[in-house]
Image (cartoon, rainbow, N blue to C red):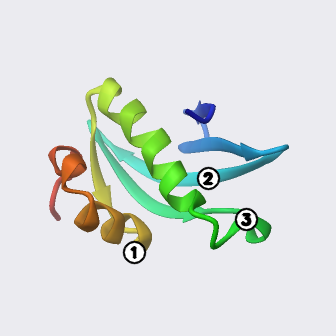
């Protein structure tokens, strides 16, 4: 598993991918819901499956925190639709 850092002050998760390069998931918090507003994989690593790596690294952390996800980022919406094992974390608008 890749190293995940939760920056609570900035409302971000960072997932260390290669060397010093990290993917970033940004969110807004509304009680026990993380509203995911954007995800970013470094340009040099795009197309290599690191979006999935980011999601598979961050979602278990979110699950362990006992919070839910409201996806606003199109990548997260699509990922959750394709991966029903994470549907229990999703809340609807």
Vertical relation: 10 (above or below) 8:
below
Write the residue at 17% across / 53% down.
91
Residue 57 image point, x, y percent: 49, 40
Determine the CA span between mark 1 and mark 2.
15 Å
Front residue of 87 and 26: 87
Please tell me whether mark 3 sits on a helix, a strand or a loop. Answer: helix
Specify few, some or many for label 2: CA neighbours under 10 Å numbering under 14, 14-19, or 20 or more: many
Q: Quadrant of the N terminus?
A: top right
Of labels 3 and 1, earlier in sequence is 3
Q: Which mark is residue 45?
A: 3
- Mark 3, Cα crowd under 10 Å, few <14 / some 14-19 / many 20+, is some
Query: Based on the displayed image, in which of its 4 quarters is residue 44 positioned?
Result: bottom right
Left or right: 45 as drawn, with respect to 47? right
Determine the secondary structure under disc 2.
strand
**Left or right: where does residue 3 sit relative to residue 19?**
left
Q: Where is residue 56 shown, x and y percent of the image? A: 44, 45
Which residue position holds label 1?
A: 74
Q: Which residue is depicted at the point 53% across and 50% down?
A: 54
Quadrant placement of the C terminus: bottom left
* Quarter of the figure with residue 61: top left
Look at discs 2 and 3 and give the one toward the viewer. Answer: 3
Residue 24, labelled with which disc?
Answer: 2
**First of labels 1, 2 by sequence position:** 2
Cα distance between the residues tagged 2 and 3: 13 Å
The answer to whether 9 appears left or right of 31 in the picture is right
Q: Is residue 27 above or below residue 59?
A: below
The alpha-carbon separation of the residues under discs 3 and 1 comes to 19 Å
Please give left or right for residue 61 compared with residue 87 in the image: right
Residue nearest the observer in this picture, 85 or 14? 85
């Amino acid at each position: 598993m890749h190293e995940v850092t939760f920056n609570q002050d900035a409302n971000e998760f960072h997932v260390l991918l290669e060397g010093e390069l990290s993917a970033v998931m940004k969110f807004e918090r509304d009680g026990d819901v993380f509203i995911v507003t954007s995800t970013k994989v470094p340009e040099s690593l795009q197309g290599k499956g690191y979006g999935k790596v980011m999601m598979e690294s961050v979602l278990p952390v979110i699950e362990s925190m006992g919070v839910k996800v409201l996806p606003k980022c199109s990548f997260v919406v699509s990922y959750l639709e394709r991966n029903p094992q994470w549907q229990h974390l999703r809340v609807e608008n």
